[in-house]
Image: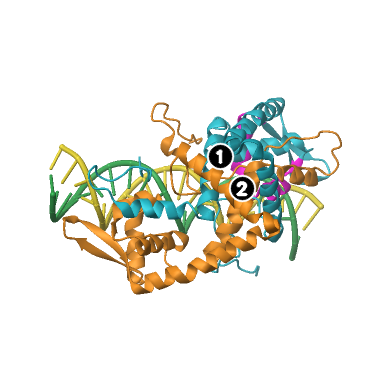
Chain colours: A orange, B cyan, C green, D yellow
Amino acid sequence: MSHDAATTPNAPGSPDRGEQVAADLLKDDFGWALGVILRRYSKAVEELLDDVPGGARGYQVVASASQNLAMNQGALGAQLGIDRTVLTYLIDDLEAAGLVSRQPDPSDRRSRRVVATEAGQTLWQDRRNALTTAETEILSVLGNEQPAFKELLQRVATHADRLDPLHNACQVVEELTEPRGGRRRRRTA
Amino acid sequence: MSHDAATTPNAPGSPDRGEQVAADLLKDDFGWALGVILRRYSKAVEELLDDVPGGARGYQVVASASQNLAMNQGALGAQLGIDRTVLTYLIDDLEAAGLVSRQPDPSDRRSRRVVATEAGQTLWQDRRNALTTAETEILSVLGNEQPAFKELLQRVATHADRLDPLHNACQVVEELTEPRGGRRRRRTA
DNA sequence: TATTGTTATACTCTATAACTATA
DNA sequence: TATAGTTATAGAGTATAACAATA
């Protein structure tokens, strides 16, 4: 997905150095700000989670498996917004790394419950603190306004999530675009 | 339809408590909040900009071309974080749509300056308001705290951008991630 | 030799569908 | 027939390299 900075009120008065002007204008943009922050955070996260198979997404699976009692793959995918076909490979890798394991569901032999191994739970607990630290570093500029910002952010996110519940970021949106129109991205074939 | 939202419970009659617990935990997450907001905003933007070639990114090019005087493609790509090889195709489409045009640089015949046509400038001005409206809708929950939030957001973003200036979001793995596979090779010719 | 822009190719994701084994 | 999970294939998007025209 492409992020969308771009729009900004412009003062077309003195066009000095176009590059600098545009750069400043971009920084007033809402989408630009969101994108920068998310990218910065994502980068820190990916670095912290580089060694876990599947990166941040793999960690999410381990985290969910650590917190909950044996969700099956369907429930896991629904919660994390991961397609089941992708989840298969992801769990394959996590299982090979010894972080989770698939266990048969006695009540439904089609289903497989994903549980975290001890190594998985250890990893989850270890990385949680590191992730919180990364978050704090990004927000450090805010000083004592940090809690206020986080509160506002959560408020906006919860609101936005109610309007459009989908739990994976940075993924193309075409899902809920209403099956009526069939607006597909057209590419000059 | 690839994946469903997490709000869909399991089968009626079997209330899976773990799912709900994990969902609540996720909502305390910083990255989750950022992702939700950005995705929601991106979706609105993509819908508003669906008819412009290249979507939001194409619009960014038109917007830059409208605001500045004739940047060449290299400068454009650097500013927007678009690779020059991608930018070529993008401008091709925008030019075919009559929104921008490539003009020769008299001082350097290798370079081409990208300028917005009248149609491009009109499009830029028309969509700006719509985008602002979309932003306002997302932030509407905040009421009169909206300006405060935006101020904090800009502060964090500017700080993050200083640490890591790269102007495209949702594009994981840039250069510093890791020498996985092939790293940039030194020129030897 | 370096740089601007173009083109061609390979690789990474993701989506779509088909398949199995259960229910 | 429907569902949980798996596997295979195709597509979009991007990166990488090579190229031509200039500097």
Foreground of the two, B89 or A101: A101
Counting labels gives 2
Q: Is residue A129 left or right of residue B112?
A: left
Amino acid at pointer 2:
Leu
Looking at the image, residue A86 lies above or below residue A182: below
Q: Chain of mark 1?
A: B
Looking at the image, residue B103 lies above or below residue C3: above
Tell me where residue A44 sits by quadrant: bottom right
Q: Is residue A13 visible?
A: yes
> What element does badge 2 sit on?
helix
Q: Quadrant of the C terminus of chain B?
A: bottom right
Q: Which residues are magenta?
A: B71-99
Q: Position of residue A35 (x, y in %)?
A: 61, 49
| Same subunit: marks 1 and 2 | no
Q: Give the residue displayed 51% in from the left and 40% down from the top.
A: A160
> What element does badge 1 sit on?
helix
**Label 1 Cα crowd, 10 Å radius (few <14 / some 14-19 / many 20+):** many
Q: Is residue B98 visible?
A: no
Residue A34 is tagged as: 2
Tell me the distance, in whole angstroms, between the alpha carbons under discs 1 and 2: 9 Å
Foreground of the two, A121 or B39: A121
Asked whether the beta carbons under mark 1 and mark 2 sit within 8 Å of each other, the answer is yes
Magenta stretch encompasses residue B163:
no
Q: Chain of mark 2?
A: A
Q: Is residue B35 left or right of residue A104?
A: right
Q: Which residue is mark 1?
A: B41
Amino acid at pointer 1:
Tyr
Q: Position of residue B34 (x, y in %)?
A: 55, 50
Q: Position of residue B22 (x, y in %)?
A: 39, 55
